[in-house]
Image (tube, rainbow, N blue to C red):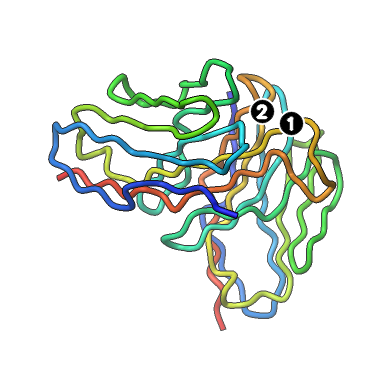
Amino acid sequence: GAGVSQSPSNKVTEKGKDVELRCDPISGHTALYWYRQRLGQGLEFLIYFQGNSAPDKSGLPSDRFSAERTGESVSTLTIQRTQQEDSAVYLCASSPVSNNPTSKRDNPYEQYFGPGTRLTVT
Amino acid sequence: GQNIDQPTEMTATEGAIVQINCTYQTSGFNGLFWYQQHAGEAPTFLSYNVLDGLEEKGRFSSFLSRSKGYSYLLLKELQMKDSASYLCAVRDRAGGFKTIFGAGTRLFVKA
């Protein structure tokens, strides 16, 4: 089946401009994460959506960052007034997070990652 | 909050065994993951431990001790393609069950 998709795959923008990154999770996955990964570094948690609960925004680095999710489908991450330090790969992941996995082989908490959006701020 | 520590880099020889350690501190532990990430690619799931003990899956095994806040990933019969970053991640009941990743361990496999 279709995996997690992200668009655009690459984005080059000028400092000060706003950008919008899109994530289409796997259908039926209730949980969705956004991470930032700078070159050669680990994953930095940004925001977490779980069903209809209020999102966990504790990882957003500043108020220039925001994210929305429509129901249990597409999510957008918006960065306003981009700065050069925002340059990174932005990864989206979704997971089923079901308390009743349909098979013993299912791991309800496994995260399925999209290919990422490489953002370069010049 | 959460704190996850793992070595920055490791080097091992093709055909050998390597153990990558991960220690964590969390207020509401609810599972530990290992992911593999090749350079320029997205992470992919390797293993999940929620109870103490060893989980084996082919050449890869993962161990968890909840009382010690400790896990390791064991890779046997190393192959050159195993050169990658290995990310330890912890799911935390506090704050709504989000998963936090460590910085990763970069493994170099040499011939």
Q: Quadrant of the N terminus of chain B?
A: top right
Whichever of callouts 2 and 1 sits on the residue coming sooner in the sequence is 1
Chain assignment, label 1: B
Residue B30, numbered circle = 1
Please determine if labels 2 and 1 lie on a single subunit.
Answer: yes
Residue type highlighted by circle 2: Asp
Residue at 73% from the left image edge and 37% from the top image edge: B31
Q: Is residue A16 left or right of residue B29?
A: left
Q: Is residue A53 left or right of residue A59?
A: right
For label 1, the crowd category at 10 Å Cα-Cα, with few meaning under 14, some 14 to 19 and many 20 or more, is: some
Q: Secondary structure at mark 2?
A: strand
The image shows residue A37 at horizontal and vertical percentages of 40, 45
Q: Is residue A89 left or right of residue B7?
A: left
Q: Which residue is mark 2?
A: B92
Q: Secondary structure at mark 1?
A: strand
Q: Quadrant of the C terminus of chain B?
A: bottom right
Residue at 32% from the left image edge and 26% from the top image edge: A65
Question: Taking B1 as reference, is B3 above or below it?
Answer: below
For label 2, the crowd category at 10 Å Cα-Cα, with few meaning under 14, some 14 to 19 and many 20 or more, is: many
Chain assignment, label 2: B
Residue type highlighted by circle 1: Asn
Find out whether the residues at labels 2 and 1 contact each other: C-beta distance under 8 Å.
Answer: yes
Which residue occupies the extreme top position in the image? A54
Q: Nearer the viewer, residue B8 or B83?
A: B83
The image shows residue B19 at horizontal and vertical percentages of 70, 60
Residue at 64% from the left image edge and 53% from the top image edge: B45
Q: Is residue A30 left or right of residue A115?
A: right
Residue at 77% from the left image edge and 44% from the top image edge: B49
Which residue occupies the extreme bottom position in the image? B111
